[in-house]
Image (spheres, coloured by chain):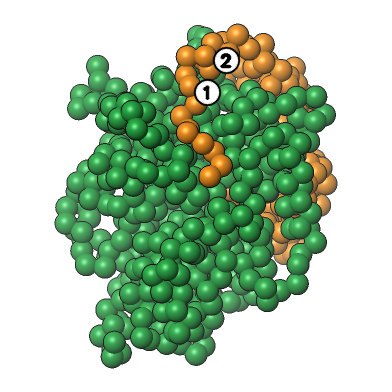
């Protein structure tokens, strides 16, 4: 019987398999950041253990870093960042520190440095590690105990997840992005559809996506409950990787291509579950509630909890609407926002910034909106500046900031105040995610840009037609 | 890891689905570099409501809705629950990473059918003490499943890293056969 991409990556990383036990799986790349690692390094110290493979471990600073100079330094963040520096020095782990020019959100720098490669196993103490699956790498988030386990052994004890294939077919409508596809899929299948599974995204719509778009989709696998998402590597993948600093070179590149081409799921492979989604009717998506499955098309209205049959779902929707300060039946386009955030490991890559800049160019941010762009990495920032995108955003009234996780989770000074409403290109609209009492609407970069200009939730067509370019 | 055998206690009822780890321990407390002391910040925002279950009920067992612990991988969520005094969480399903994190620190995640969890919630609201017994794999009288490896690690409080390092030969053999895939890490 044929094997899936998941089967192939899993089986080629088996260190040990014993009946009735979880598998022992080798980890090719361990990405480390400041928030989920200090207790793991402490654990190593207490037990007198070393980092087994510092040459397969890379650290960066992202969650806590200030993205501007407009706030005083936070001593707790500084201590955590200093701890990362100390730990990396003591254990010999390479660190892309803030200011090195190579720093950025861990899930942005892995791919751009060429570290994220097809067929690898990649872990990080961060749930959005699923992003790297866009390259056909098995990549998943782990907790701090597992971070310590990988630091000490370069392996993980894991049970093989079940497999779910979501096939996207049909014709993509104008202005519909990868973000809309994944939000629509989660809206349709629910936030638990991926629990216990690895999702492979497939079909002609996925094959036509850029690597940036594929990363956006895989990034949000965790919001569907799946630890990992996968997309088969193809010519788009190889073209993105070729020449990247850590990618194989010369003969090694040719050999790698041969290995990578063999990774795709065999035609006769069987998945535990398969779903097909016709994208033809999908419109830009906007979340109205407090989890990513609470989502409707931008042309829609805030749903009425009374229409939900399941009492638990009804209660959750009522709670969400109360938190969000929304009334059932309100058209999405009538919802005014206070803030707009373009950034995060979901949507902070160069293509995302180009899409947003296209909408913003020659226009002004609505006077009641504070809008910011936070590039995903120092390299994305440099690239955008070389293309003049920073000027486009700044001229329109956006803040152009330094790389980091920023307002996606508000661990740094970029937070919403209680009651503030934000259109955000990030991945989670949980209560308080962007700041206690803050209200998040998840959208694509182009919808975020249009919303910044309109001052209320808006599609690109709403502002591009209404205003002279 | 803290060993777990059984607990008999009143239970706290949190009848909400999709409780994410951002609620269990909000981000501002993730700047600590210690493993301990997170309990006082458990459900920090929700606890401001005097009617929030944690302010009304006591117990070492938490009964929760489906998909408990979804979202962020922060192990701090499991640390906070344990530090607050919970030994077990019973729910119809869990976020995968949370469940894994809980198992690694000796906080027992128990999966029961939704109707069984609802029934336990009723009994807990009536003040009944419940028993979660890992040796018997039973919670409030309902049998639950847990794989033998996780169960043994929990019952004996085993150091999983120590267990893995016993397979040093296998790890070294794998490494000898698989050269590093990177031409360089730092560029």
Disc 1, SS: strand
Q: Is residue A7 visible?
A: yes
Q: Are marks 1 and 2 in contact (CB under 8 Å)?
A: yes
Relative vertical location of residue A70 with respect to residue A402 in this rendering, above or below: below
Q: Residue drawn at (41%, 38%), measured in percent from left and top?
A: A247
Chain A rendering hue:
green
Which quadrant is home to the C terminus of chain A?
bottom left
Q: Which residue is mark 2?
A: B171
Question: On the image, which quarter does residue B110 sit in?
Answer: top right
A347 or A89, nearer to the observer: A89
Disc 2, SS: helix
Q: Which residue is mark 1?
A: A26
Relative vertical location of residue A431 with respect to residue A123 in this rendering, above or below: below
Q: The chain shown in orange is which? A: B
Decide: few, some or many residues near mark 2? Use Cα within 10 Å; few <14, some 14-19, many ≥20: many
Q: Position of residue A438 (x, y in %)?
A: 59, 70
Identify the chain of the residue marked 1, using the numbered disc in the image. A
Q: Position of residue A429 (x, y in %)?
A: 51, 61
């Amino acid at each position: 019987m044929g094997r899936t991409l998941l089967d192939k990556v899993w089986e080629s990383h088996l260190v040990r398999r014993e009946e009735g036990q979880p598998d022992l799986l080798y980890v090719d790349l361990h990405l480390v950041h400041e928030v989920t690692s200090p207790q793991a390094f402490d654990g190593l110290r207490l037990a007198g253990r070393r980092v087994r493979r510092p040459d397969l471990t890379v650290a960066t600073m992202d969650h806590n870093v200030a993205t501007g100079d407009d706030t005083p330094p936070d001593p707790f963040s500084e201590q955590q960042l200093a701890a990362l520096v100390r730990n990396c020095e003591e254990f010999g782990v390479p660190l892309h520190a803030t200011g090195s020019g190579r720093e950025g959100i861990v899930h942005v720098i892995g791919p751009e440095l060429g570290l994220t490669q097809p067929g690898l196993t990649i872990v990080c103490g961060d749930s959005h590690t699923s992003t790297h699956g866009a390259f056909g790498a098995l990549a998943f988030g782990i907790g701090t105990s597992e971070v310590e386990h990988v630091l000490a052994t370069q392996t993980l004890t894991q049970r093989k997840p079940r497999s779910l294939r979501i096939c996207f077919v049909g014709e993509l409508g104008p202005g519909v992005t990868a973000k809309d596809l994944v939000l629509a899929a989660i809206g349709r299948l629910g936030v638990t559809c991926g629990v216990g599974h690895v999702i492979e995204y497939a079909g002609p719509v996925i094959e036509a996506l850029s690597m940036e778009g594929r990363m956006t989709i895989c990034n949000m696998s965790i919001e569907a409950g799946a630890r990992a998402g996968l997309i088969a590597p193809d010519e788009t993948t190889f073209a993105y990787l070729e020449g990247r600093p850590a990618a194989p070179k010369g003969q090694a590149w040719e050999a790698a291509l041969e290995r990578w081409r063999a990774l795709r799921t065999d035609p006769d492979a069987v998945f535990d579950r398969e779903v097909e989604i016709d994208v033809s009717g999908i419109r830009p998506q906007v979340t109205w509630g407090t989890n990513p499955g609470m989502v409707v098309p931008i042309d829609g209205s805030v749903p009425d909890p009374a229409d939900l049959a399941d009492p638990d779902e009804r209660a959750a929707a009522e709670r969400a609407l109360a938190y969000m300060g929304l009334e059932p039946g309100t058209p999405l386009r009538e919802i005014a926002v206070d803030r707009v955030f373009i950034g995060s490991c979901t949507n902070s890559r160069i293509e995302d910034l180009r899409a947003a800049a296209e909408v913003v160019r020659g226009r002004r941010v609505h006077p009641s909106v504070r809008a910011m762009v936070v590039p995903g990495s120092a390299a994305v920032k440099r690239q955008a500046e070389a293309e003049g995108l920073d000027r486009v955003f700044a001229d329109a009234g956006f803040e152009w900031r330094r790389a980091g996780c920023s307002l996606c989770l508000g661990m740094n000074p970029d937070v919403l105040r209680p009651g503030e409403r934000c259109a955000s290109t990030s991945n989670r609209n949980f209560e308080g995610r962007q700041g206690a009492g803050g209200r998040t609407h998840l959208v694509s970069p182009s919808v975020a840009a249009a919303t910044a200009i309109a001052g209320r939730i808006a599609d690109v067509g709403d502002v591009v037609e209404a205003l002279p370019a | 890891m803290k060993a777990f055998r059984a607990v008999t206690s009143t239970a706290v009822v949190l009848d909400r689905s999709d409780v994410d780890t951002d609620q269990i321990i909000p981000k501002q407390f993730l700047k600590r570099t210690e493993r301990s002391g997170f309990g006082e910040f458990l459900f920090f925002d929700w606890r401001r409501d005097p009617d929030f279950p944690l302010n009304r009920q006591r117990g070492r067992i938490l009964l929760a809705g489906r998909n408990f612990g979804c979202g962020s991988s922060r192990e701090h969520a499991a640390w906070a629950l344990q530090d607050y005094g919970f030994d077990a969480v019973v729910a119809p399903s869990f976020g995968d990473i949370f469940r894994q994190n809980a198992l690694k620190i000796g906080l027992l995640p128990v999966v029961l059918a939704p109707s069984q969890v609802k029934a336990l919630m009723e009994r807990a609201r009536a003040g009944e003490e419940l028993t979660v017994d890992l040796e018997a794999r039973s919670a409030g009288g309902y049998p639950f499943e847990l794989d033998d490896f996780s169960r043994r690690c929990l019952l004996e409080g085993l150091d999983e890293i120590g267990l893995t390092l016993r397979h040093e030969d296998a790890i070294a053999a794998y490494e000898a056969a698989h050269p590093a895939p990177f031409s360089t890490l730092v560029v």
